[in-house]
Amino acid sequence: MGRRQELEKRQTLLARFGRLIATENRLDSLLTIIAEEVRNILDADRCSVFLVDSYKGELWTRVALGMEEKILRMPLGQGIAGFVAKTGSAVNIRDAYRDTRFTQDLDRITSYQTRSVLAVPLKGHDGQVLGVFEVLNKARGPFTDEDDGLLRILGTMAASFIENASLYDELRRSHLETIYRMALVAEFRDQQDTGKHLRRMSRISGILASAMGMSYHESEDIRYASPLHDIGKVAIPDSILRKPDKLSFEEYEEMKRHTIYGSQMLIHAESRLLRLAAVVAIAHHENYDGTGYPYGLKGEAIPIEARIVSVADVFDALTSKRVYKGAWTLADTLAHIKAQAGKQFDPAVVERLQVCFAEVVAAMAEEDQRTAAEENLMTPPAVPGQISQKSLQA
Ligand code: C2E
Ligand code: SIN
Ligand code: SIN
Ligand code: FE
């Protein structure tokens, strides 16, 4: 290719890069797009974007491990990327394994062999280092000074978009966290394993929603809104909520009002997720055959989100110990839910539960194993279609 054609090609690629990154405001998708484009433009085998977590004093990046994506973290200062983040200067090396700064940690985890590395700092609007752009294993020869210049231009173009997306991500995460902690508050009086119940029913709701053909975003919304389904129980007196045996008729009538209380608390919210939670709160005890409460809605008149959460809620309630009952086995629980298809539950949702049963059981086991320290990990998943995300903490 002639010099002129090469410059024209480069212009086209840069313009395309600018267009693509301007259309994405979600951090996870933005980072995916950036990595893919930068890899192509620089003719490299890989591109990693590392971002600084100044709160923890770490750098993190997403890596693909087979079908899964994981967040890998390392201390600022460690590795090539850590060196670049700490010093703010670029690094260009031909053979990583001969460079003492290179730790091989990422290579080991991802079964990769890094040879050439070009890494430049990614700077924010006021000059602070936001992260590091790294390209690995150039197709032909080592990275050149021209590649270095190009990677810096791409970094400059991407920086403000990454900054905005991070802010948006942070806002979204604190919103989700607040919702989740509201739900924790509501359940706190009710159960010993508060967090576990909420996380499990939230996971099951998400799995059922996507199995029902809902989009990734719709399923995620259900996953995040569902923990609030019983928020109205905060208004139920302890004498009823914590009664160790069967409720009287009057007590049960009062208990049923938790659906109405919950929706009153949420319905006028500005937040879309909270309004969805209101819908779930009011209708999660409606039965498919019209015998439920509070309104006796029937069939498709019950919002689909509530029909899904209803199955997830009862599944989890039955398999858990309550003040008034012991835990049921998985087999008894599934048999009970199947027997209620078309009665208490939407048969389509029950059918999906059977199809996804292994996934549901695995998700429950995963939530059971989470430690209290991970209690705040209601983080958005890394990539569409993926619910599980664990960080490999160094
Ligand atoms: P929860 O404990 O979260 O239960 C949610 C739903 O799971 C129940 O809605 C019911 O559909 C199902 N479920 C739970 N345990 C059983 C069970 O042993 N057998 C069957 N067949 N289904 C079960 P429901 O019945 O409308 O109850 C709503 C809430 O009222 C319950 O939430 C719980 O907080 C309270 N509650 C219900 N029954 C009793 C009771 O006998 N004693 C006490 N103390 N509370 C109760
Ligand atoms: C990096 O690639 O910059 C970090 C990984 C390492 O140094 O092993
Ligand atoms: C982080 O762990 O700080 C970022 C993870 C994410 O964006 O989901
Ligand atoms: Fe309920």
Image (tube, rainbow, N blue to C red):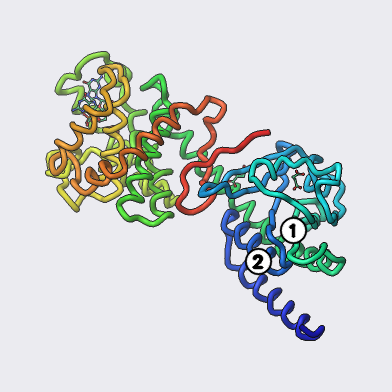
The quadrant of the image that shows the C terminus is: top right
Q: Mark 1: which secondary structure? A: strand
Q: Residue at x 81, y 51 (%)?
A: 128
In the depicted structure, whether residue 82 falls above or below residue 373: below
Pick the residue in front: 290 or 262. 290
Decide if residue 242 is on the left or right side of residue 98. left
Q: Amino acid at mark 2?
A: Glu
Decide if residue 369 is on the left or right side of residue 320. right
Residue 372 is situated, as x and y percent measured from the top left of the image, at 53, 25
Decide if residue 302 is on the left or right side of residue 53. left
Mark 1 and ligand 2: say if the CB distance to the nearest ligand atom is below 8 Å: no
Q: How many residues crowd around disc 2 within 10 Å: few (fewer than 14), some, or many (20 or more)?
A: many
Residue 196 is situated, as x and y percent measured from the top left of the image, at 42, 28
In the depicted structure, whether residue 24 falls above or below residue 312: below
CA–CA distance in space, label 2 to label 1: 15 Å
Residue 37 is tagged as: 2
Pick the residue in front: 135 or 159. 135
Classify residue 325 by image quadrant.
Answer: top left
Residue 66 is situated, as x and y percent measured from the top left of the image, at 54, 48
> In terms of image quarters, where does ligand 2 lie?
top right
Pick the residue in front: 58 or 229. 58
Residue 42 is tagged as: none
Residue receiving disc 1: 137
The quadrant of the image that shows the N terminus is: bottom right
Residue 180 is situated, as x and y percent measured from the top left of the image, at 46, 37
Q: Amino acid at mark 1?
A: Asn
Q: Residue at x 41, y 30 (%)?
A: 365
Q: Residue at x 68, y 44 (%)?
A: 60
In the depicted structure, whether residue 57 falls above or below residue 209: above
Classify residue 148 by image quadrant.
Answer: bottom right
User: In front: mark 2 or mark 1?
Assistant: 1
